[in-house]
Image: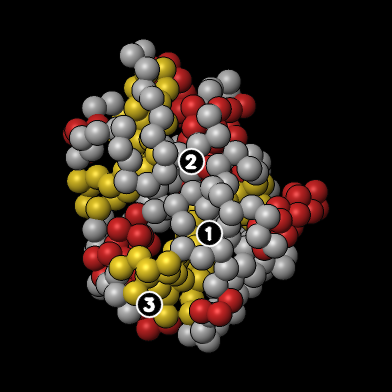
Amino acid sequence: MDVIRIDADAQARARHLRDTIRHGEWTQHTSGLADDLVQGNVVILPRDLADEFLLYCQRNPKPCPLLAVGEAGNPALPGLGDGIDIRSDLPRYRVWRDGVLVDEPTEITSLWRDDLVTFVIGCSFSFEQALLEAGMRLRHIDQGRNVAMYRTNLATAPAGPFSGPMVVSMRPLKSADAIRAVQITSRFPDVHGAPVHIGDPALIGIHDLAHPDYGDAVEVMPDELPVFWACGVTPQAAITQARPAFCITHAPGAMLITDLLNQQLASDQGE
């Protein structure tokens, strides 16, 4: 991602939200929490796996669009926000050992190591502002829920030990809004871009929308279509396949809030 100028007001609001999270005052999902600020999925791996995971992201830019890669052992991410500490600035983390989820803490300071590398991957929460501004209603936001996420039968391109199915997020939309959503989100390739599927979920291996693999279910009305976007939880499916001895991710929906504005990621932004 190109270097982007930081807006002072956005920086102040983002810092306030991260402080709230850092002090344990917000431990839930961040959907709708920071409508105009870029949010990111997080994967933290030992340095000996970092190159192969970087290649995995490069081969799968739709579900894994990289926003930033940290330096080994450094919890700061200066390109995404002033004062970010990845050890405490997510509402909830997931700790994995040998590919098995073993804990979901609210901070990881005691687990931090000098060999850990942080990857921040674009999140579909970041294009929701543009959909809302176009007059669309997003049911999970209206209901205060996390977005529904599903494992699919769409395979990702493997790299080293990393492989597995693409995970998607789903938002129900009326037909006309679905068409507009394709047009709008295609402008945001750094946060998954246009949908990967619209309509029959069985065609991508999803058999029950009422039971998402991650997040919260929302009803799809008779006059609506389920619209599916690639999702940054995809690496968590790859982690269960790769079975690294140690790994940390965000809990689904519990994102890193950055200082960047969503509109700055739009592909038609001027200099």
**Circles 1 and 3 in contact, beta carbons < 8 Å:** no
Q: Amino acid at mark 3?
A: Phe
Q: Residue drawn at (68%, 55%), measured in percent from left and top?
A: 25
- The relative height of residue 254 versus residue 84 in the rendered view (above or below) is above
Residue 262 appearing in the image: yes
- The relative height of residue 109 versus residue 219 in the rendered view (above or below) is below
Mark 3 or 2, nearer chain start = 2
Residue 266 locus on image (x, y percent): 57, 42
Label 3 belongs to which residue?
246
Quadrant where the image shows the N terminus: bottom right
Cα–Cα gap, marks 1 and 2? 13 Å
Q: Residue drawn at (46%, 63%), measured in percent from left and top?
A: 104
Label 2 belongs to which residue?
146
Label 1 belongs to which residue?
92
Side (left or right) of 82 relative to 62:
right
Q: Residue drawn at (32%, 46%), measured in percent from left and top?
A: 213
Label 2's element? loop
Residue 76, numbered label: none
Residue 40 appearing in the image: no
Q: Residue drawn at (60%, 49%), measured in percent from left and top?
A: 38
Cα–Cα gap, marks 3 and 2? 27 Å
Q: Residues within 10 Å of mark 2 (few under 14, many from 20)?
A: many
Side (left or right) of 209 relative to 174:
left
Residue 5 locus on image (x, y percent): 71, 55
Residue 45 locus on image (x, y percent): 42, 75
